[in-house]
Amino acid sequence: MTDTDPKPETTEIATRKPAPVSILSGIDYPQECATAMVVFGDLEDTIKSLIGPENAVQLARVWLHSMRMNEKLQQCSPASLAAALMTCAELHLMPGQFGHVYLVPFGREVTTIVGYKGFLELARRSGEILEMVANVV
């Protein structure tokens, strides 16, 4: 790499000071989660417009918890973190313990996988389902 080559995306994020995330202003987060919080801060207004301020606070807390609990997520590229976060916001599903959406790191990319509870929630919200029955297979 020469001096004229653009710096990799991760170098730019690593040197950037996290933007103040207003909905999490009173919460301390570990340095390892700084990239995830910068990504959230950059998308905060969009997320609020998609799911509302109250749900954005909940998503931010769950997002931070997911980052703290999974070391490999902390190493993922900011672009893939942003894509995963936007998928969660667009579907109005929470990652992590809720079982709606799982954030699965593959190398430096995050794959968003909708769990069966997420599919059930989406089906309920559609208004087109009269009844759901689950049986052991």
Image (cartoon, helix red, strand yellow):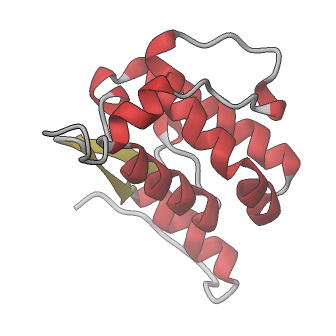
Q: For the N terminus, give its image quadrant.
A: top left
Which residue is at 51% across, 62% downward?
87
Up the image or down, 85 lies above or below 73; here it is below
20 or 104, which lies in front? 20
Which residue is at 41% across, 52% downward?
79
Up the image or down, 122 lies above or below 54; here it is below
Total numbered badges shown on the rendered structure: 0
Q: Viewed as shown, does residue 28 lie left or right of 108?
A: right
Residue 33, horizontal then vertical, whole percent: 49, 21
131 or 49, which lies in front? 49
Outermost residue on the bottom side: it is 128
Q: For the C terminus, give its image quadrant.
A: bottom left
Residue 64, horizontal then vertical, whole percent: 57, 27
Up the image or down, 113 lies above or below 22; here it is below
Q: Viewed as shown, does residue 75 lie left or right of 65?
A: left
Which residue is at 75% across, 32% downward?
21
Which residue is at 52% across, 23% downward?
34
Quadrant in which residue 60 is drawn: top right
Residue 82, horizontal then vertical, whole percent: 49, 52
87 or 18, which lies in front? 18
Quadrant in which residue 73 is drawn: top left
99 or 61, which lies in front? 61
Residue 12, horizontal then vertical, whole percent: 43, 36
